[in-house]
Amino acid sequence: MKNLPKLKNTIRLLLLIFLTLSFGNSCKGSKEKKNTLPEQAGIILGFSQIGEESAWRKCNTRSVKEAALESGVQLVFANAEQKQENQIKAIRSFIAYLVDVIAFVPIVADGWDNVLREAKDAGIPVLITDRKINTADNSLYAGFIGTDSLEEGRNAALFLIKKFGIKPGESGKEFKPINIVELSGTEGSSVATGRAAGFREVLDEYPQFNIIHSESGDFLRSKGYELMHSILGKYKNIDVVFSHNDGMTLGIIDAMTEKGIKPGKDIVIVTIDAEQAAIDALRLGKVNFVIECNPKMGPEIMDLVQRLVAGERIPRLQHVDEQVFYETDDLSILEPRGY
Ligand code: GYE
């Protein structure tokens, strides 16, 4: 029995060859693994990332990879290319490979119980990152670290109340209706659901705000452009656009500009992520309020992974620090965003 750890490492090495070969082409970030098999694998983390749909996501991936390198965690990285079934396949491969910990970004909130039960049966702890899952069985994962999408939605609404000069508790009767278009993120994702819910939770107290149209742009710039073009053709009385991420907002700005509408002036724009391009648009007055959603959670993820391997309990829920940026802020002091 004393050779068990050696046997486990041999099995892992053989499986890592298999896994690196099988994920070699679809796992964009794993190319650096192809020719460098670990002599002594320390902690091995299987990480399933959803894809590369936005600048935010690419920064999130960089943060995880850089933090793994920094902390000596051996990362087996799988890019799901926006498909939940690819994430489930990758998690099953991590289980077969006997990784020490599994971490993943659930592209949507539902449909994870079966594969997480397999990880639990294999005795592999699971860390949920960035987006949340819906499950009745909290034993299926050790903890969550990511963004507080409900709060992001609330902040978007609180800005509009200020922007339109509405005092708390004022009735909506003496105001003309303020018409809002919402372009939401990936349907079924906890972040799109949370942002929408937080936004409505605050605005429901103010009858002057009307959400006249809400549609998913899937966090994609191209969809933001396409949807905004058609929405502008349909509605002539839009006062506000609430966009669930900066990628879609950049498409929205292009569509408005092409239609002769001044974004941030003719129509108020509120956006989430705080990527560099959105801060630049804020400086130019093309958007009015930017809510940070922090992608740089790699170091915290590695810390939690190491604590799990050490047998420690970790927080069930850990939100990353986030801030907001107003059109009236002094943006000249801001560091480059890095995404
Ligand atoms: O807002 C968006 C990305 O899950 C918080 O996904 C993340 C969201 C982010 O595509 O840009």
Image (tube, helix red, strand yellow):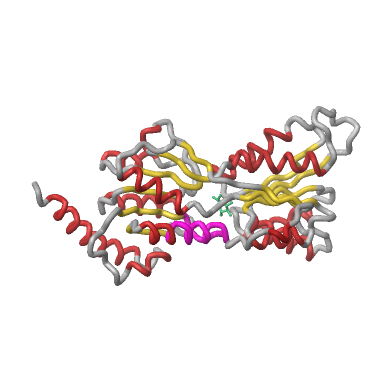
Q: Residue furthest left?
A: 1
- At x 61%, y 39%, the residue is 150
Residue 64 in which image quadrant: bottom left
How far across and down, in percent of the image, does residue 207 sit?
Answer: 80, 32
Residue range in magenta is 50-65
Looking at the picture, does residue 5 appear above or below residue 222? above
How far across and down, in percent of the image, does residue 271 sit?
Answer: 68, 51
Q: Nearer the viewer, residue 195 or 277?
A: 277
Q: Is residue 177 visible?
A: yes
Q: Main secondary structure of the magenta part?
A: helix
Q: In the rendered structure, does residue 55 fall within the stretch colored magenta?
A: yes
How far across and down, in percent of the image, does residue 17 sit?
Answer: 25, 64
Q: Residue furthest front?
A: 333
Q: Is residue 226 visible?
A: no
Q: Nearer the viewer, residue 49 or 307?
A: 307
Q: Residue furthest bottom?
A: 35
If the image is split into quadrants, where does the C terminus sit? bottom right
- Compared across the picture, whether 93 is left or right of 152 comes to left
Q: In the rendered structure, does residue 148 fall within the stretch colored magenta?
A: no
- Compared across the picture, whether 285 is left or right of 126 comes to right
- At x 31%, y 52%, the residue is 94
How far across and down, in percent of the image, does residue 79 sit?
Answer: 43, 59
Residue 41 in which image quadrant: bottom left
- Compared across the picture, whether 213 is left or right of 217 comes to right
